[in-house]
Every structure is written in C-alpha cells, then in structure tokens.
Amino acid sequence: MLIVMLIPVILMVMFGFAISTEVNNINIAVVAPERTGAVKDVVGRIAHNDYFTFYGYIDQDQIDKKLRSGKVSVVAVFASNFDRRMEQISAGLPSKPVIQFIVDASNVNTASASIAYLQSILPGTASQQAMFETRMLFNPQMKSAYNFVPGIMGLIFILVCAIMTSVSIVREKEVGTMEVLLVSPVRPVKIVFAKMIPYFVISCVILVMILLLAHYLLDVPMSGGVWGIFSLSLLYLFLSLSLGLLISTVTKTQVAALLISAMVMLVPVLLLSGIIFPIENFPKFFELLSNIIPARWYIAAIRKMMIQGAALAAVWKEGTVLLGMTAVFIGVSLKKFNDKLE
C-alpha cells in the first residue's frame, strides 16, 4: 500500500515540478583576445540569457581541459579582429566567421540545444550564418547512442544486480535455512560475501556482454581505455550487489525485496541520474537529492571515459563517491545481519 500510494505522488511532483526536458543552465566560457565593446555586447547577451550560465573568460589553452572536466559545455572563441569582421558582415562583404563555438557533444541533447539558443541570441538576422561556426567535440556525428549507452549501462547494472541479490538472504528466511546459518560458526561477513560472489561472477559476464555490444554493435568508442572502463564498472557492480544485499537484510519476504529493488529503485534511477533529464535543470532540492543516486556518478564517469577519452585517474571524484557508497552499503548490511544474529 505504501508503494501504491507513494509512487503516484512522487511521479506527479517530479514530472510537474522538477523534471523538464528543456535544456537550461548551460555553462559557457569565452575566449576573447580583444575584449572590445562589441565583444562585451555579445558576451552580455549570452550571460544574461536564462538558458546559459556564464563561466567567465578563459585562455585558449584551457579549452580542452574545461570541456573534458565537465565544468563548461560550450566555449565561444572570438576572432582577434572581431570588430572589423563584424563591419564587413554588416556591409554584406565576404568574411570569415567571427565566433567559433566549441561544443561538448557527448550529450547530444545539450549540444543541440546550445547551438539553437546561441543562434537565437546573436545579433543580426540574415548575416547570422556568416558570424559563427560550430565545432563538435567527442561526438562530431551527434550519435544518440553515445549519450544513451552509458545511461542504459548504469540502469541495467544497478537493477539487475540489486534484483539478483535482494532475494538471496530473505530467501533463506522463507525456506527456513536461516536458522542453520544463525547457529553455524561462520562469521556474518563470510555469509554476506558468500551470498554476493555467485552473483558477482554472473554480473561480470553481463558486463562483458554489454561492453562488447556497445563497442561492436553500436560503435560506441572506448577512448578512455578498456581496462579503466572495466575497473570502474566492476566497482559499480559491487556497489549494486551491496545495495541488493542491504535490501535483502531489511525485508522479510522475497516479494517485498523484489518490489523495492525493481519498482522503487527504477523511478529515482531513471529520473534523477541524468539518463534522460539534465540534472542541471532540477530545482536545488532534487539536484542535491540526485547526489545519493549511485547511477548518477557512474554514468557521468563512464561518459567521460568512453566518449571524452578521460583516463581512470581523471574520474577519481566519481570513483571515490562510488567506493564510499559501497563501503556504507556493506557496513549497514553487516550491521543488520549482526542484529538478526543477536
């Protein structure tokens, strides 16, 4: 009854208030060798637009670093002779583009929206096409698979692993073999890890299958290195299995464990992890709430490693968060299992 009554309320609140398919709060940086009045006018148009968040001025050699770090999604590079070229464009004379927009296209939706918004706020109408050129990084062909494959990986692993392990301990209670475990000399930590090992092996097989399909069937690159992606994915699998074990220790029936691991987890993972809806669009409360969703950190890291070519060391923040969550889930699972022994 709690699930039946609570999920409709959560969905209505989130879709009506928090979730939006409209892309906004796009971080944009500017490279301007000459900060003339005309340059500042264009930058002011961008900075005061509701769709953009002005990151500030950066140097030319910082462009790649800022885009790969995820701190900015777009960099506007102004030509050194911006004023003179603008006069030529206004007079109808041929001229090279005066602004180059370098866009992080690893997220196709954000990249497309960024260009559309920038076109609408640039000065002039008929001469707009002569003013700028765009350069798409990491996903120049704008393939949607580059955006969705990391998200689907994050969703599949946490659901499948949690569902598999969520019924492991609770099943012992239902069939009556828990009493044998309780009186055995085996330590609780060994019981918990013994329950996890078979499902971890199965999860590794699933991981290999999905990586092969992503690379050879969907042509998703592994720019950050296969071993780095595999290592981070193993950590995420272990976290998902730990979460399933936690669910198994706090529930009393297999049906309840399946409902929690499948239905209740599906909604927050699907809506708050960045798979479909940009996290930057959320109200502050839901943006903070998304930080406790493990899939958010895994998806962000895998996108950087697969598409942007980031090494494992470059996603240390996401890896540290996933490792900390794993330790918490394992610790709480052991604590709950010890409580049952007492």
Image (cartoon, grey):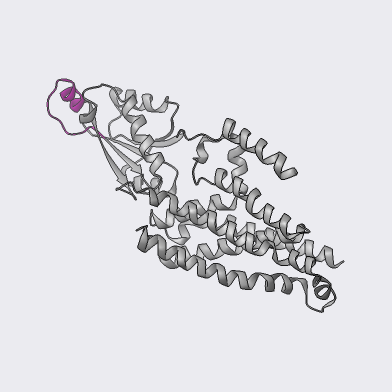
> Where does residue 127 sit, x and y in percent of width and height?
21, 24
Residue 77 found in image quarter: top left
Q: Is the residue 300 above or below the residue 130 in the image?
A: below
Between 77 and 22, the one nearer to me in the picture: 22
Between 185 and 71, the one nearer to me in the picture: 185
> Where does residue 18 sit, x and y in percent of width and height?
57, 34
Give the left or right position of residue 188, taking residue 202 as reference: right
Residue 193 found in image quarter: bottom right
Instruction: Answer yes or no: is residue 93 visible.
Output: yes
Q: Is the residue 222 above or below the residue 65 in the image?
A: below
Give the left or right position of residue 315, taking residue 261 as reference: left
Q: Residue furthest bottom?
A: 185
Give the left or right position of residue 204, taking residue 164 as reference: left
Give the left or right position of residue 203, taking residue 33 as reference: right
The region drawn magenta spans 84-99
Is-magenta flag for residue 89? Answer: yes
State the residue at coordinates (81%, 66%).
338
Instruction: Answer yes or no: is residue 73 visible.
Output: no
Between 281 and 171, the one nearer to me in the picture: 171
Is-magenta flag for residue 124? Answer: no
Which quadrant: the C terminus?
A: bottom right
Badge count: 0
> Where does residue 159 sit, x and y in percent of width and height?
59, 56
State the residue at coordinates (59%, 53%).
294
> Where does residue 246 sit, x and y in percent of width and height?
71, 59
State the residue at coordinates (73%, 73%).
191
Which quadrant: the N terminus?
A: top right
Q: Residue furthest right?
A: 342
